[in-house]
Image: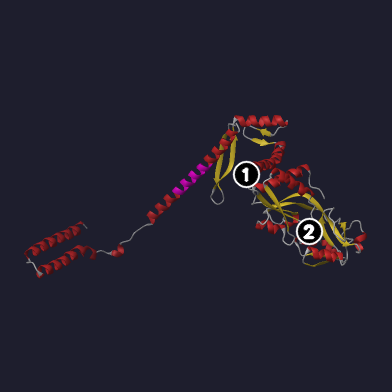
Amino acid sequence: MMAAARAWLTAVVSVTLLLSVVQTLTPKGSLRKITSFVGGLLLLAVLLRPLGSMDLSAVSLNLDAYRQTVEQRQAELEQEGQKELVGLIEAELESYISDKAADMGLTLRVQVTVEPDGSGVPVPVSVELTGPRSEVLSRWLETELGVTLFNRTHRSVELTAAGSYFYKQMEPLLRQLEAIVQTVQSMNAQTPKLINLLVRRLADYGKLTQIIKNYSETCPLIHVNILTQEDRGSRQLLITGEVEMAFCYQYEVESDPKLKFLPIMESQYYVLVSKTHPLAAYKYLTFDDLAGQKLILANTELHRNPRLITRPQLQAKKIVVQTVYTSFDSMLIAVQSGIGFTILPCSRSKKFSGLLKIPLKDVRPMPLGIAWYGARMSPELEAFIALAEKQNVEQPPAIV
């Protein structure tokens, strides 16, 4: 290899010297130009001679090792970045909690644990609070209440049954307090907010009106816009976001796990008949009494209740189901004409012109309450739900 390089270098030097001599001896003119051109070609041939003897097919670039190095370094950088992000989240959360505790006069040691979730995104999974003042605060709270709220061991602190109950009852009040604070802070802007509530006209609004009244007094800058919609169901309107909450029957929303429901009362089922119908003489009815009669239903959300129209009693008693009426009002007109009866959940006080309302004993009362989309909780909605939960504690749901 060295001998070939030495021979090539000697040839280059020899040709260069030879060209210099020839160029000097050649007179000026066309002959010198021709000599310079031929000499240049000769020198180029000598310079390129090693390439002629090179086997280019044997030349190959092996990038596998380089690629592996790059990928390994990239993985290391991603791992380092993940660790830095986890550390940053932990540090920021610990600092935030410590600052809030300091504002309350508490000295706490805060330890936040962050781990990647199923998609690899780091999220907080636990927070540990320790410190002398936290124990003082918990002891003071127990002294004020006169009960033991915590079971303490050397390794952990757990809520007692009384502590768990206290926490569950305080949680909606804290949400309500947060909404009140936000409302007070927004009063300077004087920008009223709107929250839409869908209601059913068959329902008893007594308890709901009290909740709305308390809510308006607590959050004066939030207006509750009450809507009625019989043709479209509560479930559809909640999912599309056209309303934030609905005052409806449980069966309307219980099939969808995304919708939450808070019962605040129960409605009895009634049989509606005209005053001239054979069933009008009964004080209360059972499915046995309805045998052979014609049941009139409307093609609305109210009568698509599977608890009602798929009951085995309907088939066993040979009750004829007729669902040719497209609206609630047309169904009532058909019942008023005496050609059949219908079944509705409604309050005792609800009256229908020209119709008798007779209790049906074979169907358990239907829960009636407030439904909302669980993943779409605004502070305004949280405050309303908190008030409803508070009223449920004071007045448990009952048949209306």
Rounded to the nearest angstrom, the CA distance separating label 1 from label 2 is 45 Å
Picture disc at residue 186: 1
Residue stretch in magenta: 76-89
* Disc 1 secondary structure class: helix
Label 2: which residue?
307
Q: Residue at x 78, y 56 (%)?
A: 201
Q: Is residue 330 magenta?
A: no
Decide which of 148, 249 is in the foreground and name it.
249
Residue shown at 17%/67% (left/top)? 41
Q: What is the x, y in percent for residue 391? A: 75, 44
Give the residue type that dot 1 points to.
Ser
Q: Nearer the viewer, mark 1 or mark 2?
A: 1
- Please provide percent x and percent y for residue 121: 54, 49
> Where residue 237 appears, x then y in whole percent?
69, 58
Q: Nearer the viewer, residue 165 or 226?
A: 226
Question: In the rendered image, is residue 319 in sight?
Answer: no
Q: Is residue 349 above or below residue 277?
A: above
> Which residue is at the far right?
281
Up-down: is 154 above or below 278? above
